[in-house]
């Protein structure tokens, strides 16, 4: 193998490692983003929305999509694209309920409750 080819292979390998580090599950992330954007855009077509936010933080958890409705109700949509334990799902659901937030869990592909 020539010197130029070795340098190319090393640079190519370094680029792949850098991309893998930056985007470890890019397909999964694309699916998750698509799910969030879908609900962010479709939910208002069937509900009277006062406000909406992507990735709404409260305390130590993040709702993928969050809505405040005109009637005062609050709704969080969790787009689950990876496995979650039933204990964690219950814990997070209770945390939403303690704040009077309805939660809709949407499971996709690998998003399962185990």
Image: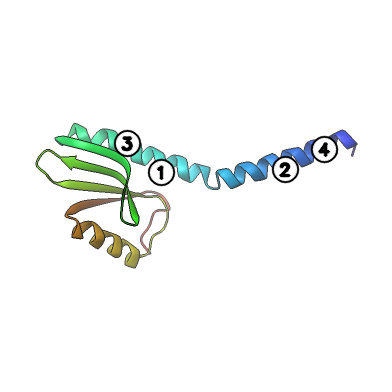
Residue 74 image offset from top left, x and y in percent: 18, 47
**Marks 4/1: CA distance?**
36 Å
**Marks 1/2: CA distance?**
27 Å
Query: Where 83 falls versus 43 (above or below)?
Result: below
**Marks 4/2: CA distance?**
10 Å
Q: Say which residue label 3 marks.
A: 38
**Marks 3/4: CA distance?**
44 Å
Earlier sequence position, callout 4 versus callout 1: 4
Q: Say which residue label 1 marks.
A: 32
Residue at x-position 43% and y-position 41%: 31
Q: Nearer the viewer, mark 3 or mark 4?
A: 4
Earlier sequence position, callout 4 versus callout 2: 4
Earlier sequence position, callout 1 versus callout 2: 2
Earlier sequence position, callout 3 versus callout 4: 4
Residue at x-position 73% and y-position 38%: 12
The front one of 99 and 104 is 99
**Marks 3/1: CA distance?**
10 Å
């Amino acid at each position: 193998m020539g010197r130029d080819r070795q340098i190319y292979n090393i640079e190519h390998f370094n680029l792949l490692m850098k991309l893998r580090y930056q985007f470890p599950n890019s397909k999964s992330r694309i699916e998750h983003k698509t799910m969030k954007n879908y609900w962010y855009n479709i939910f208002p077509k069937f509900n009277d929305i006062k406000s909406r936010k992507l990735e709404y933080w409260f305390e130590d958890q993040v709702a993928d999509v969050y809505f405040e409705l005109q009637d005062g109700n609050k709704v969080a949509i969790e787009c689950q694209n990876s496995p979650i334990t039933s204990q964690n799902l219950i814990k997070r659901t209770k945390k939403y309920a303690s704040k009077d937030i309805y939660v809709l869990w949407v499971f996709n592909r690998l998003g399962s409750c185990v």
